[in-house]
Image (cartoon, rainbow, N blue to C red):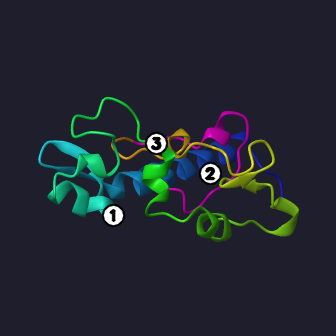
Amino acid sequence: MKVTIQGFMLVLLLMLLANTSMAADSLTQFDGIKGRSYHAEFYEEKACDSCHLNKSPLSLPEDDACLACHDLEELVKTTARPEDEKWQNPHNNMHYGKDVPCMECHGEHSSRKPMCAGCHSFNYPNFQK
C-alpha cells in the first residue's frame, strides 16, 4: 500500500480534530469559570480550595489535590500499554516514572497537550486535555 503525503496529512488532521473535540466536550462554562464537566460538583459548591490552596487561586494545584481523589496506582493500571510499549504509559514512563506533575498534561480550566508530545507522537486515545 502506497501512502501519499496528502493522505498522511489528512489522517494527521483528522486525528488532531478528534483530539480537539474530545477535549472540548469536557470543558464547560460554570458561572464565569471554565472547567471540566466531570468536576461539576466543585463548581456548583464554589469549592476552588478543593484543588487550590485557597479560594483565590493564583497558582496550579499541587499533585496532592489531584491524588486526594484520583489513585495513582489505578491510573497507572488504567493507562498501561502492551508489553512492547509499556514505558509509553503517561503515568509511569521511562523518563520520569510516576513523578510527572499532573498539571504538566492535564488542565482543569483549559486544554493541555501531553508533556510527551513535545518529543514523541504516542497515541493516547482516551486522553482528555
Of residues 92 and 5, which is closer to you in this image?
92
For badge 2, the amino acid type reads: Val
For badge 3, the amino acid type reads: Glu
Q: Nearer the viewer, mark 1 or mark 3?
A: 3
- If the image is split into quadrants, where does the N terminus sit? bottom right
Secondary element type, mark 1: helix
Q: Indicate which disc, 2 or 3, sits on the residue closer to the N terminus.
A: 2
Q: Which residue is at a point 88% across and 63% down the rendered structure image? A: 84
Q: Which residues are magenta?
A: 111-129
Q: Nearer the viewer, mark 2 or mark 3?
A: 3
Query: Tag 1: Cα neighbours inside 10 Å, few (<14), some, or many (≥20)?
Result: few
Q: Which residue is at a point 54% across and 57% down the rendered structure image? A: 127
| Label 2 to label 1: alpha-carbon separation | 30 Å
Residue 58 within the magenta-colored segment of the rendering: no
Q: Compared to 21, does 57 lie above or below? A: above
Residue placed under numbered mark 2 in the picture: 11
- Considering the whole magenta stretch, tell me its main secondary structure: loop
Q: Which residue is at a point 57% across and 52% down the rendered structure image? A: 15
Residue placed under numbered mark 1 in the picture: 38
Q: Which residue is at a point 69% across and 52% down the rendered structure image? A: 98
Q: Nearer the viewer, mark 2 or mark 1?
A: 1
Of residues 13 and 41, which is closer to you in this image?
41
Q: Compared to 5, does 72 lie above or below? A: below
Secondary element type, mark 3: loop
Residue placed under numbered mark 3 in the picture: 62
Q: Indicate which disc, 1 or 3, sits on the residue closer to the N terminus.
A: 1
| Label 1 to label 3: alpha-carbon separation | 19 Å
For badge 1, the amino acid type reads: Tyr
x and y percentages locating residue 62 in the rendered image = 46, 42
Secondary element type, mark 2: helix
Judged left or right of residue 96, residue 55 is: left
x and y percentages locating residue 74 in the rendered image = 60, 70
